[in-house]
């Protein structure tokens, strides 16, 4: 396909100084025609092109001057969810072709906008996607849309300002001639999901050189009026596009419905125009009826426009200084250079906590510095670890380390759970990915996550401990979390683990826990390799130690648990010990503990209910 011969038609239309009508909700219309809610809507460009074409025809007939191509999620990452990433070029090309054919057949002067939605992956540090990877993915899609002949790019419904900036940069690299509408969506507090206020969005996008700054989706027209006011007040010289949802959605009989407020939408469209929006359309729930009503109202709208001031205090940009809480006992001990001994306890399967309390009291008498409380180890159902941590700290008087896996938790649950933990006095948190649910007793349980470990570490260290939530909104007094991260001393790719650790350190990790260590030299080798790349490793390491029960246990750990390597010499010792294998396993752990002591800042014991064995190891470490 050849690119469009006149890619600057949008600027010419804007110069006419009249409202430009954008179309409505492609997804809403497609789902209404075929109930495709669980399918890849963009793939309908190939499988059901007539349905897509009919949506374009209906919106053009309603008065739309810009139709948005059905390519919102047609990037490599979102298509991969449907195993269609190999069809990226075909899907995007087909979408442009459908729109172009409908526009030509209509005989109307309608512009075609290539739709570029978010990638569906979190950017670092909250996800694994780098800015370069994001930019390459956007370039891949935008290049196809540009070659197909779109008149402009509509980057819509983005939630991450940093991500949409990468989309803008990608477009400037592969299609510098195309105008860009860059639009973000807002939560009920008038901030993006990443915490950016409208004034910050307007400034950043204006500096990035976009042609039109947009706000879409969100709650409805009333909310986007506020957002538009704020953006215009901050950057009055910019051009704006507003495309609200048809109000807050409601669910009924398994389907999503939006309020039927066509006349209200028409009134709000005029308000958008008077208050500074040059492009006006609709997002989720808006139909050709909405677009028609808006078009008719805008055709008779006054030419003179208003400038309504807003109170920018409603959209604070700066972060006020906060007073930090005193450090936890664990933090103080590590800072003072004390050698730490922690021991692991798993929550019970039921609600009876008597054994847990007895074990905690036993370890208190042994002199442990903290008790690690695991969260659903091996993806098995157990009592909530925060309850166990709270019980141990309040009834026994020993500080705990809450294990907090990101797997299986969405962003809302992560923040709510951690704030609740902090409110009950649990401040040492060990952030880990967590075991996949497929290996547990509920293999079909939700296994997704919104944050990677380094992202949660940064959220706790850089935001919660500053009194800010994920979106950047203050929640009052800052937290005082002491945040731990996982360290694999026996990774399949050493350089990858080193870089992962460096990300955690940059994110603000305070201490590290390792898997069971059976080779002291691995600690030294890892430290040396890290220092060559990033300088000395100064974050305290608590080395994991696990007593071997018998030769079979040693073989299992060595062959089936990633990151654990049991030397052949230890396996031979366990085999030769025969009925005394348990005692031999204790001797090995004592040897390792003494050998590790000069190179780590503490020990993390995993005794698996073998409390008496743990006591012997603790005594050996203390006396070394």
Image (cartoon, grey):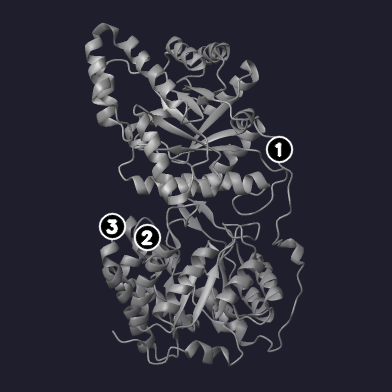
Task: Say whether disc 3 or disc 2 marks the residue closer to the N-terminus.
Answer: 2
Indicate the position of residue 502 as horizontal and vertical percent values: 47, 48
Q: Write the residue at 36% across / 67% down.
A: 74
Measured Cα–Cα span from mark 3 to mark 1: 48 Å
Answer yes or no: do the residues labelled 3 and 1 have beta carbons within 8 Å?
Answer: no
Question: In the image, residue 520 lies at what x, y percent?
Answer: 37, 29
Quadrant of residue 307 within the rendered picture: bottom right
Give the residue at mark 1. Answer: 325
Q: Residue at x 56, y 88 (%)?
A: 14
- Whether tag 3 and tag 2 are in contact, CB under 8 A, the answer is no
Is residue 254 in sight in this rendering? no
Which residue is found at the position 49% from the left and 25% from the top? 383
Residue 318 location, quadrant:
bottom right
Compared to residue 38, the image places residue 150 above or below, namely below
Label 1: element kind = loop
Query: N-terminal of the two: label 3 or label 1?
Result: 3
Please identify, in this view, whether the residue under mark 3 or under mark 1 is nearer the observer: 1
Label number found at residue 153:
none
Could you tell which of marks 2 and 1 lies nearer the N-terminus? 2
Q: Where is mark 3, residue-wise? A: 83
Task: Look at the image and tell me in which quarter the N terminus lies.
Answer: bottom left
In this orientation, which residue lies closer to the viewer: 581 or 198?
581
Q: Residues within 10 Å of mark 1 (few under 14, many from 20)?
A: few
In the foreground, 375 or 33: 375
* Residue 366: percent from left, percent from top: 54, 12
Farthest top residue?
A: 579
Residue at mark 2: 78
**Is residue 223 found left or right of 21 in the rendered image?**
right
Q: CA distance from mark 2 to mark 1?
A: 42 Å
- Asked if residue 202 lies left or right of residue 518, the reply is right
């Amino acid at each position: 396909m050849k690119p469009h011969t006149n890619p600057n038609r949008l600027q010419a239309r804007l110069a006419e100084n009249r409202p430009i009508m954008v179309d409505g909700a492609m997804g809403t219309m497609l789902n209404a025609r075929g109930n495709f809610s669980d399918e890849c809507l963009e793939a309908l460009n190939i499988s059901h092109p007539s349905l897509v074409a009919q949506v374009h025809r209906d919106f053009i007939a309603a008065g739309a001057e810009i139709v948005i191509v059905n390519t919102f999620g047609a990037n490599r990452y979102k298509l991969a969810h449907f195993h269609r990433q190999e069809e990226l070029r075909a899907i995007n090309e087909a979408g442009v072709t459908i729109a172009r054919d409908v526009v030509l057949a209509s005989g109307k002067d309608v512009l075609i906008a290539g739709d570029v939605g978010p990638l569906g992956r979190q950017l670092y540090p909250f996800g694994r996607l780098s800015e370069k990877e994001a930019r390459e993915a956007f370039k891949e899609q935008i290049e196809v849309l540009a070659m197909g002949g779109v008149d402009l790019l509509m980057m819509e419904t983005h939630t991450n300002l940093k991500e949409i900036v990468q989309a803008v940069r990608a477009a400037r690299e592969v299609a510098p001639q195309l105008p860009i509408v860059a639009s973000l969506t807002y939560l009920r507090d008038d901030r993006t999901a990443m915490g950016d206020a409208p004034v910050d969005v307007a400034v950043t996008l204006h500096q990035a050189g976009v042609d039109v700054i947009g706000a879409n989706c969100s709650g409805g027209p009333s909310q986007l009026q506020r957002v538009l006011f704020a953006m215009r007040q901050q950057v009055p010289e910019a051009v704006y596009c507003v495309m609200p949802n048809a109000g807050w959605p409601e669910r009924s009989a398994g389907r999503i419905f939006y309020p039927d407020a066509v006349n209200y939408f028409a009134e709000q469209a005029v308000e958008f125009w008077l208050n500074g929006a040059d492009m006006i359309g609709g997002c989720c729930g808006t139909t050709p009826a909405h677009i028609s009503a808006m078009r008719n109202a805008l055709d008779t709208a006054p030419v003179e426009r208003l400038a309504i001031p807003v109170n920018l205090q409603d959209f604070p940009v700066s972060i006020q200084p906060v007073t930090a809480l005193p450090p936890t006992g664990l933090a103080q001990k590590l800072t003072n250079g004390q050698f730490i001994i922690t021991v692991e306890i798993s929550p019970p399967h039921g609600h009876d906590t008597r054994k847990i309390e007895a074990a905690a009291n036993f370890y208190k008498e042994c002199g442990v510095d903290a008790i690690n409380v695991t969260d659903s180890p091996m993806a098995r159902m157990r009592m909530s670890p925060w309850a166990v941590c709270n019980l141990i700290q309040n009834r026994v008087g020993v500080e705990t380390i809450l294990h907090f896996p990101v797997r299986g938790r969405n962003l809302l649950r992560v923040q709510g759970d951690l704030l609740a933990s902090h409110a009950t006095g649990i401040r040492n948190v060990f952030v880990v990915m967590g075991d996949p649910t497929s290996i547990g007793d509920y293999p079909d349980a939700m296994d997704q996550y919104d944050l990677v470990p380094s992202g949660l570490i940064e959220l706790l260290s850089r935001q919660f401990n500053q009194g800010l939530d994920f979106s950047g909104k203050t929640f009052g007094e800052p937290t005082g979390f002491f945040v731990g991260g996982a360290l694999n001393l026996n990774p399949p790719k050493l350089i990858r683990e080193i870089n992962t650790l460096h990300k955690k350190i940059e994110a603000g990790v305070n201490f590290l826990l390792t898997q069971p260590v059976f080779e002291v030299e691995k600690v030294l080798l890892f430290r040396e390799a890290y220092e060559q790349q990033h300088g000395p490793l100064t974050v305290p390491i608590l080395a994991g130690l696990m007593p071997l029960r018998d030769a079979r246990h040693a073989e299992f750990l060595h062959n089936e648990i990633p990151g654990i390597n049991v030397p052949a010499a230890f396996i031979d010792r366990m085999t030769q010990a025969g009925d005394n294998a348990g005692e031999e396993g204790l001797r090995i752990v004592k040897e390792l503990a003494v050998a590790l002591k000069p190179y780590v800042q503490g020990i993390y014991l995993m005794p698996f209910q073998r409390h008496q064995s743990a006591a012997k190891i603790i005594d050996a470490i203390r006396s070394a």
